[in-house]
Every structure is written in structure tokens, then in C-alpha cells.
Image: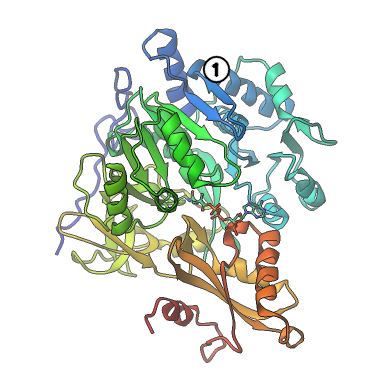
């Protein structure tokens, strides 16, 4: 039995802590919580100052390559200048105030970074969403969050216009485009003409900073609220130990701008140490292009879901040698030991796993240099204390299956979400004794390594996406061919897990061509909700397994798919 937990004791100077000094040094202690923290003024402006004093090398802060191969390079000084202008646009031109909410649906364009930092400077709560969102997804997000504004591109502008009348709080529409649109403000030209003088808000570390939407087993996505302390975590020594980035490193994070992984990997992690963030705006993922980029650019670190590394291995026929790549990190879904082995054999590099959820950010992993146990996702990362717990919140003995729990009493660790906004019921459902219950199943060995097993509920993790079956079932239900459906995870040789829909057809469609119908239903889901959720497999059945009260037994279908029944 594990030793009893002794609790975190705030370091002396709690709430009065001072940043540690030295260029690129971790500037706070793991268990210190400064009363005020703002990533823009405390981190970015610090590096701007280091640049001015000649204490940082010539590498850019942001190095962005678009799909035509055009390159943009910004120093920290330029980032500071432009994001201050962006903050002025949001507050002065748009009239947004601290605490207001702004939906942000942009691909990997530079304005995404300017809006995020501008919001942080002004205390505006930003709500990133993937560019794959469809009108219904956007409508729900705008309505439930009471967003005052939205920033997007011309691809989604017509969708937003079609639903704006149903969003009474929505006053501001900002467009990132080469063309103008009636009723939309042109963000690029506004930033150009805005003043670069802006006084950053003195945000409390526990003030809200961002809201992310995350899928659950039932119902519509929940709003996961994070405070400014989420960004502070990247400054803590435990987090710095994880990736051990240096100012001279060039870090490529693949995450779509809609996910919390983007905040971590496409901003906080590299910029906290003054490293270069490398971004490639590729509208459609192509492993061949990724391989070429890794050969062409001096990238030292990569962060991507296991599927990206697996697809590179599938596409490349020979051994892979990337001249500058030193450290590869992966997360978002479980890494299989065979993928780890193949990547090592063909590239000479190891894959270091990190694990986290939208609610937690990165909460465990294998720091560079720590022994990798293939199949394990590493150890808990302070100030998080991960324990394997039962459904009552009791810690379980080593090597016993249970839920991944993060201790939040007596002290809620900085970086853990603040709760599901406007949803005390769902928030209390994940509070389990002294722990946040992640709903992910795992074991922990005697050395503290955590071994992921799967989900406790019906949520599907496919290609690094968290997919709520009900969202797919609801989309299917809107097609006249579907009498009822059940959506579960199913094995796949490349993607490991994909979304599968079991469908009972309405009588009128029973005689239709099944292949044709499959394609039509897949297209239907792609058009109604974010396409990454579409069922890559479809099976037509005469009935669905149900409990005596009529509830669909998704678990029976899932077990059958994985040969467990
Ligand atoms: O495979 P198909 O071609 O049939 O369908 C694909 C796309 O073509 C299609 N699609 C995309 N945009 C569309 C569209 N269809 C219609 N209209 C549009 N606007 O939809 C399907 C999307 O599937 P996908 O995204 O899985 O596509 P793909 O191209 O295979 O990409 C592979 C990956 C690996 C690049 C992608 O799956 C990916 O980015 N996955 C990572 C997700 C991620 O970052 N997760 C991290 C979440 S945060 C977290 O875990 C917390 C950690 C601390």
C-alpha cells in the first residue's frame, strides 16, 4: 500500500513570491502561487527586454511558414508591439472589457497569436475553437458562453452571419482576410493603425483567462475554464524539466489552434524560455510535407499526437534521419510500444510521452533523460499529485486499475481547471473526495509510472480528439435514413481507434444501396458538425442492444469491436 499523502505545504513567501533571476531560468518555484501573473507582461515582455539588452540570440520568437512556403519571422519585440496593438483594438475599437468573452476560430495564421496575447493583456477571456467547427457548433458556443465577439476567417464568416441574429450578446465580428465583408471589422488593418502603447491588466493568477469546450459522454460540450495560472505552470521548474527547452531551440508544435495543446505547445512552452516557436500552416495534413519540413528547417523539438509520427513512418519507405531534430514529444492519445520502437529504429530518436486533458493541461509525462518504460506515459508532474483512485476517491494500491485522480484538496494545484463554467452539477461530478477524477483508467507501478488503460465512460479518443458519442448520434439523427444509432470506438490499423456508428435504418431506406448510404451519412455528419468526428466505419443493424429501461448499451458494442465479448 502506498504511503499516505502528506499534502502540499505552500513555501514560505506564498502569495509574496518573487521571480527567480537569470536569463532563461525558471522564475517561480513549483509550489509558489504569486498573487498576480500575466503571461504577456511577465514572460513575453521579459524576453522583449532581454532582446533589447542583447541577452537573447537572434532567433525569432515566431517562425511561421504558410501553405505557399512564405515565411514570417517575428522577434519578441515585434510580438510585444503587435499584441499591444491587438489589445487596443479589442478594448478601444471593439469596446471589450476585462472578463468579456471572445470566440476565436482561426487557423494557424499570425493573428491567432496576436489575439490570444492581446486578450491576455486586456483580461478578455478567449475561447479557441477548431476551424473544423460548423454553424451549429459555433451557434452553441456563442450562445452558451454569451460571447460578446468573434474572430474568424472568411470561410466561416457566412456561417456566423447566418446565426448572428440568434446570439443577442454578439456585438463584435472581427475578420482576418484579404477581402472585406459587410458588417465585419478588418482585424489586420485595425492592428496596423492601432497604438502600440497599452498598459497590461494586473491579472490575479486565479483570474479567468480562457475557456475551452470539451466533449462529454452525454449532452453538448462543456466549458472548461482556466485561469492565468495555467500559463504560469510553464514557468515552474517541474514543467521546465519535462522538455528542457533552451533559448536557442526551435520547437514545432502540430496542434490545431482550437485545442489546449496549442496554448501549451504553440505558446507557453517555447516562449517561457525564450525559444523559437515554429509553425507550419498546412490546411490538410500530409506526412510527406511534414517529413520535408523536418529536413528543410532547423527544428530541434517536435510535439505531435502519436498518429502524426505513425503516419510519417507509414509514408516513408527508408530510414529517417532528421539533421537537427533532437527531442520528440507526443501526447493526446496513448502511444503504443511498437510505435515507440519503430520511431527509435528508423529515426534514432525516442518519443517522450506527455498526458493531459483539457481540464488539466499536461499533468504527467516522461522528462527528457528519465528512463522510458514503453507503454507508460511517465510520472506525475508537480504541482500535480496524480494518484490512482476508486470511485469514492480512495487511493488504490500499486498496479491496481482505477481512475486517474489529481489531488485538489487541501490545495488546488495551479493549472488545474477552475470548473465547468455555469455547470456546477458537472463540476461536482468530477470531484471525487480530495481528487479531480479524470475518468481515464490507469494503473501506477511502484516507481510512480502511470500506465493508461482507457476511458471509464463512452467518450472516444481518436487521432488525439476527444469525441462525445452523443454529438455524432445527434448529427446522424437529423438524417431521414436514421431511425436510431449508437456511436462507439472501433479498432483501426493506422489510427488505432476510429469512430464507428451502428445504425438502425428507417423503413424507407432499408432497400437503399448500403455503400452509397454510408458515404451519404458520413458526408452528412461532416457537414453538420466538426468533420473530425465523422464515423469512419458504419454498420447497419436491425436493432441496438439495450437495457430493460431502454438505454442503449454502447459498452456491449464497444467490447464486441475490440473482441472482448
Ligand atoms: O480522413 P478524411 O479525409 O475522410 O476526413 C478528414 C478531413 O479531410 C475532413 N475535413 C477537415 N476539414 C474539413 C473536412 N471535411 C469537410 N470540411 C472541412 N472543413 O475531416 C476529417 C478530419 O479528420 P482529421 O482531423 O483526423 O484529419 P487528418 O487529415 O487525418 O489529420 C490527422 C491529424 C493527426 C493531423 C489530426 O487528426 C490531428 O491534428 N489530430 C490531433 C488532435 C489534437 O491536437 N489533439 C490534442 C487535444 S488537446 C489534449 O489532448 C490535451 C493534452 C494536454
Element at badge 1? Answer: helix
Q: Along the line of sight, which residue is nearer the eye, 432 or 137? A: 137
Q: Position of residue 316 (x, y in %)?
A: 42, 48
Judge whether residue 229 can be spotted in this image.
yes
Q: Along the line of sight, which residue is nearer the eye, 23 or 250? A: 250
- Few, some or many C-alpha atoms within 10 Å of disc 1 (few <14, some 14-19, many ≥20)? some
240 above or below 437? Answer: above
Q: Along the line of sight, which residue is nearer the eye, 405 or 482? A: 482
Judge whether residue 228 can be spotted in this image.
no
What coloring was used for the rendering?
rainbow
Residue topped by disc 1: 78
Q: Residue at x 40, y 76 (%)?
A: 562
Q: Position of residue 33 (x, y in %)?
A: 35, 35
Left or right: 430, with 552 as reference point: left
The outermost residue toward the front is 318
The quadrant of the picture occupied by the N terminus is: bottom left
Q: Along the line of sight, which residue is nearer the eye, 434 or 221? A: 221
Left or right: 293, with 69 as reference point: left
Q: Position of residue 543 (x, y in %)?
A: 59, 88
The quadrant of the picture occupied by the C terminus is: bottom left
Q: Position of residue 522 (x, y in %)?
A: 65, 67
Q: Residue at x 59, y 46 (%)?
A: 284
- The answer to which quarter of the image holds residue 500 is bottom right
Left or right: 106, with 301 as reference point: right
- The answer to which quarter of the image holds residue 32 is top left
Amino acid at each position: 500500500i502506498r504511503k499516505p499523502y502528506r499534502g502540499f505545504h505552500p513555501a514560505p513567501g506564498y502569495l509574496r513570491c518573487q521571480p527567480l533571476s537569470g536569463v532563461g531560468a525558471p522564475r517561480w518555484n513549483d509550489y509558489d502561487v504569486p498573487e498576480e501573473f500575466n503571461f504577456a507582461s511577465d514572460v513575453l515582455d521579459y524576453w522583449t527586454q532581454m532582446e533589447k539588452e542583447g541577452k537573447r540570440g537572434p532567433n525569432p520568437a515566431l517562425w511561421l511558414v504558410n501553405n505557399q512556403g512564405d515565411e514570417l519571422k517575428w522577434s519578441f519585440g515585434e510580438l510585444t508591439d503587435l499584441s499591444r496593438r491587438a489589445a487596443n483594438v479589442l478594448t478601444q475599437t471593439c469596446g471589450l472589457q476585462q472578463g468579456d468573452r471572445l470566440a476565436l476560430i482561426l487557423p494557424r495564421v499570425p493573428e491567432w497569436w496576436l489575439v490570444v496575447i492581446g486578450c491576455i493583456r486586456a483580461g478578455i477571456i478567449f475561447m479557441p475553437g477548431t476551424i473544423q467547427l460548423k454553424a451549429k457548433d459555433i451557434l452553441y458556443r456563442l450562445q452558451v458562453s454569451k460571447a460578446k465577439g468573434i474572430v474568424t476567417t472568411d470561410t466561416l464568416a457566412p456561417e456566423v452571419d447566418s446565426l448572428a441574429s440568434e446570439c443577442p450578446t454578439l456585438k463584435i465580428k472581427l475578420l482576418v482576410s484579404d477581402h472585406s465583408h459587410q458588417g465585419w471589422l478588418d482585424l489586420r488593418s485595425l492592428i496596423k493603425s492601432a497604438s502600440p502603447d497599452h498598459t497590461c491588466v494586473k491579472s490575479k493568477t486565479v483570474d479567468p483567462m480562457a475557456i475551452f469546450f470539451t466533449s462529454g459522454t452525454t449532452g453538448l460540450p462543456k466549458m472548461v475554464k482556466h485561469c492565468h495560472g495555467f500559463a504560469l505552470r510553464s514557468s515552474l521548474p517541474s514543467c521546465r524539466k519535462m522538455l528542457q527547452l533552451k533559448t536557442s531551440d526551435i520547437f514545432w508544435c502540430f496542434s490545431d489552434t482550437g485545442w489546449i495543446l496549442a496554448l501549451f505547445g504553440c505558446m507557453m512552452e517555447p516562449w517561457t524560455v525564450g525559444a523559437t516557436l515554429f509553425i507550419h500552416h498546412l490546411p490538410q495534413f500530409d506526412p510527406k510535407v511534414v517529413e520535408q519540413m523536418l529536413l528543410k528547417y532547423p527544428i530541434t523539438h517536435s510535439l505531435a499526437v502519436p498518429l502524426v509520427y505513425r503516419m510519417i513512418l507509414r509514408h516513408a519507405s527508408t530510414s529517417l534521419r532528421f539533421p537537427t531534430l533532437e527531442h520528440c514529444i507526443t501526447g493526446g492519445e496513448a502511444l503504443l510500444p511498437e510505435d515507440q520502437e519503430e520511431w527509435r529504429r528508423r529515426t534514432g530518436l525516442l518519443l517522450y510521452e506527455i498526458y493531459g486533458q483539457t481540464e488539466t493541461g499536461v499533468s504527467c509525462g516522461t522528462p527528457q533523460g528519465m528512463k522510458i518504460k514503453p507503454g507508460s506515459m511517465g510520472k506525475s508532474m508537480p504541482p500535480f499529485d496524480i494518484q490512482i483512485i476508486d470511485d469514492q476517491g480512495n487511493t488504490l494500491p500499486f498496479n491496481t486499475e482505477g481512475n486517474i485522480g489529481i489531488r485538489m484538496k487541501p490545495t488546488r494545484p495551479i493549472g488545474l481547471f477552475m470548473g465547468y463554467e455555469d455547470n456546477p452539477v458537472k463540476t461536482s461530478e468530477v470531484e471525487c473526495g480530495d481528487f479531480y477524477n479524470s475518468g481515464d483508467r490507469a494503473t501506477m507501478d511502484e516507481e510512480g509510472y502511470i500506465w493508461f488503460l482507457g476511458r471509464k465512460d463512452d467518450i472516444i479518443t481518436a487521432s488525439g480528439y476527444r469525441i462525445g458519442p452523443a454529438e455524432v448520434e445527434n448529427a446522424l439523427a437529423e438524417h431521414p435514413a436514421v431511425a436510431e444509432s449508437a456511436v462507439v470506438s472501433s479498432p483501426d490499423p493506422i489510427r488505432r481507434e476510429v469512430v464507428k456508428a451502428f445504425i438502425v435504418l428507417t423503413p424507407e431506406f432499408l432497400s437503399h444501396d448500403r455503400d452509397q448510404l454510408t458515404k451519404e451519412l458520413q458526408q452528412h455528419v461532416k457537414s453538420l458538425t466538426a468533420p473530425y468526428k465523422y464515423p469512419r466505419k458504419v454498420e447497419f443493424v436491425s436493432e441496438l442492444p439495450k437495457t430493460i429501461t431502454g438505454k442503449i448499451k454502447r459498452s456491449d458494442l464497444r467490447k464486441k469491436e475490440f473482441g472482448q465479448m
